[in-house]
Image (spheres, coloured by chain):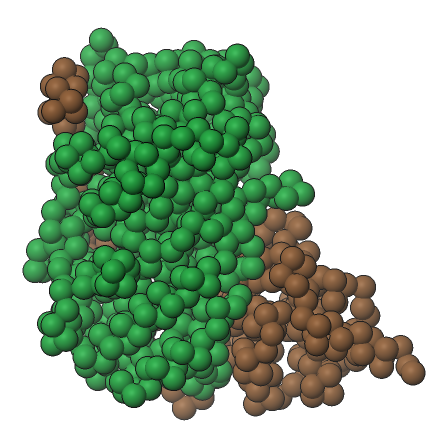
Chain colours: A green, B brown
Amino acid sequence: MSEVQWRSSGLPVTEAKDITQSSLTLDADVVIVGSGAGGAVAGYELARRGKKVVILEAGPYVPSKDFTERFPDSLETLYQDHGGQTNKSGDLLVLQGACVGGSTVVNGCVCFRTPDFILQDWQRDFGLSDLTSEEMAPYFDRVEKNLSIEDNKEHEIARHGQLIRAGANKLGWSVKPFKRNIRECALTGHCLSGCKTERKQSMLVSYLPWATAHGARIFADTRVTEVLADGGQARGVRAEITGHDGAKVAEMTVNAERVILAAGAVQTPLLLLKNGLANRSGQVGKNFACHPSLYVSARYPKPVHAWRGAMLGVYVDEFLHPDKGGFVLEDGGAGLAELSMTAEPGTGEPFMAFMEDAKYLAGLVTLIHDHNVGTIRWEDGRKVIDYQLANSDFPSMKRALKAAARLHLASGAEEVYVPSSDQRVIRSEADIDAAVEGLENQPQHLRMVSYHPQGSCRMGADPDTSVVNSDGETHDVKGLYVADASLLPTSIIVNPQVTVYALATRIAERMA
Amino acid sequence: MSSQQQTARRLSSAFQQGVTRRRFLKWGLVGSAGVAAAAAGGFALLRLSPLDDRPKPDWADGLSRQEYHLFDRARVALLPTVGTDLTPSDQVPVVRNVQGILGFMDAATRKDVATGLTLFDNAAVLFHGKRFVDLDEATARDYFDAWSRGNVVQRTLGTVIKQLTYTSYWRDESTWGPVEFDGPVSDRWGIAYLGNAPLPDQQPDQATEEGNA
């Protein structure tokens, strides 16, 4: 094995601007498509075991020092489709990182293990009998240790979190500090724009540099266009390297007997569909869950400054289990741009009055256990995220919304703003039912955001009803693996990054 | 029946029928945009506006003249600051910022958005006898409010225009002081960079044993 070459900062990435040939051919043991949660972890775990690893990332390499801490700018530079990726009807923004490090660069650091009852569902409904809590525990332990995942300390619970915690306690609801993957949080509140000073333990400052220390090579600006396979065996990939001006710089071929797709729950199925691979079951791109969230803002009598301090402090798990509602409430900081787009306080003067009071606003994020009713597909050469909140999930969304309103009021809020297209303001418990029950499950009525797309290449024991097995290998193509949130057979209610890290660790270990 | 009346009737009919979701192409900065290409495509302007002859600024090469005036009207209607400490919107490059956001769209989506904006502008003739760009501020706000309660086409277009306008205002640093928004802080606070996390102390063999435990 070659010498380990760890560097204390920065990441050796080959970018389009570094390419001088029009065609490149590389040989590797494993080629990985995507450098986010799944790809980076798999890359490191394989590289440190002596495998020759190449990681291809379609997005740019943006070093931490270039993060601007301006959310609208960050949407344009770090996110898929410059922050404009939505479902087909346009009422649900699907936010995914599109840069080296993927969504781990721009997430809120929230870490949950996969709930036991979710693993039990997977065992029962998808034949994933080996994915028990006991089996997964060592993988969770490992990633939690590697990524400094710990409970928020008291100073990491900002004013908005303190308010929400007090309200939850008043209601007698279970409320806990988040676990986050962060070292010495600087309390800037700019998580969604990337952590400029490298405290968030994203892949950009952890698994990717570790993978390169063990010899892995990373290419940015490199979009895989074709997965090579013959005789039911993966052979590698073809890709295009494109400059930031949109001009193609070079073509690349990577020959490898192992291909790991970790491009995320939208791009991974699109790639398989484009190549007509691994879809004997017809399930590629199906069973997509968006895990839709709402940001419920409220005005408090004293200044909160929701942009100050750690972005996410505490969460309410009182309703986590499906038998109790199947949703979580997370306190969430926000900046001006986000606040301006989440509520509909009225047009003109009412809106400007709302924003003039922005320092009095605090927010709650609702996350529900949605059904896997969506589809990812191509249509006229363009990707389509066909997802509308199922009617069967709408009651859950409304329950979460009502609970968020109750919690805000119990926390001392004077006005709660329903995130709908029309003006709905709640000022007392008596207002809640009327404001929420009047909502309709229609496109463009709720302002939803998906931070956790998942489920589009689901795992399962049955090749007729699933795309990959519990080791992440596709049923149809030997050596072709999936290691991102596409795997998840159901939505897991909570933030999924740790689940993806753990599954990717396990998949890589079994491949090695 | 005049061609204008015919056009108005066709447009109204499209609304009444409710344009199907499939006829939209979606885009949104935060959650929106759909554009009724079929409903508005090919229509001439329902009514001329005095603004039609007024030039757009030199920098606005990414906007049509009509789009420029539409967003400038939206700026005035949606971002009133009289009587507040907020930064007047005419001191903020709102429309220029809108242009920047639209510039990130792929060509097909951008074309659909253009069609939707035309629809939004012209449909005001049916309700108020004037194009949106010619509505006074109060009527323009009423128009937005009515669309927020309308069908999916109306909700979509109303939302996307609002959000483009709002974001384009609040992203500008000059708007932050009056509301005590801190903006970027790391450099200002002199926060040290931590660099990469230390390599884990896992050895290949140990890790395998760990994983098989």
Q: Farthest residue toward the top? A: A1
Q: Observer-nearest residue: A74 or B55?
A: A74
Q: Is residue A498 above or below residue B39?
A: above
Q: Quadrant of the N terminus of chain A?
A: top left
Report if residue A120 is visible in the image.
yes
- Residue A277 in picture, x, y percent from top left: 53, 26
- Frontmost residue, B150 versus B130: B150
Residue at 35% across / 82% down in the picture?
A433
Q: Position of residue A387 (x, y in %)?
A: 50, 54
Report the residue at 16% width, 19% height from top. Answer: B208
- Residue A65 picture location, percent across and down: 30, 43
Residue placed most toward the observer, A398 or A239: A398
- Side of B155 where A348 appears, left or right: left
Which residue extends farthest right?
B1
**Looking at the image, is B24 positioned above or below residue B181?**
above
Give the quarter of the image for residue A392: bottom left
Residue drawn where x is 43% and y is 49% of the image: A372
In the rendered image, the residue lying farthest to the front is: A124
In-image side of A469 versus A214 (left or right): right
Q: Is residue A462 above or below residue A444?
A: above
Residue B198 is situated, as x and y percent measured from the top left of the image, at 15, 31
Q: Which of the 4 quarters of the picture holds residue A138?
A: top left
Residue visible at 43% across and 17% down in the picture: A478
- In this rendering, position of residue A193 left or right of residue B42: left
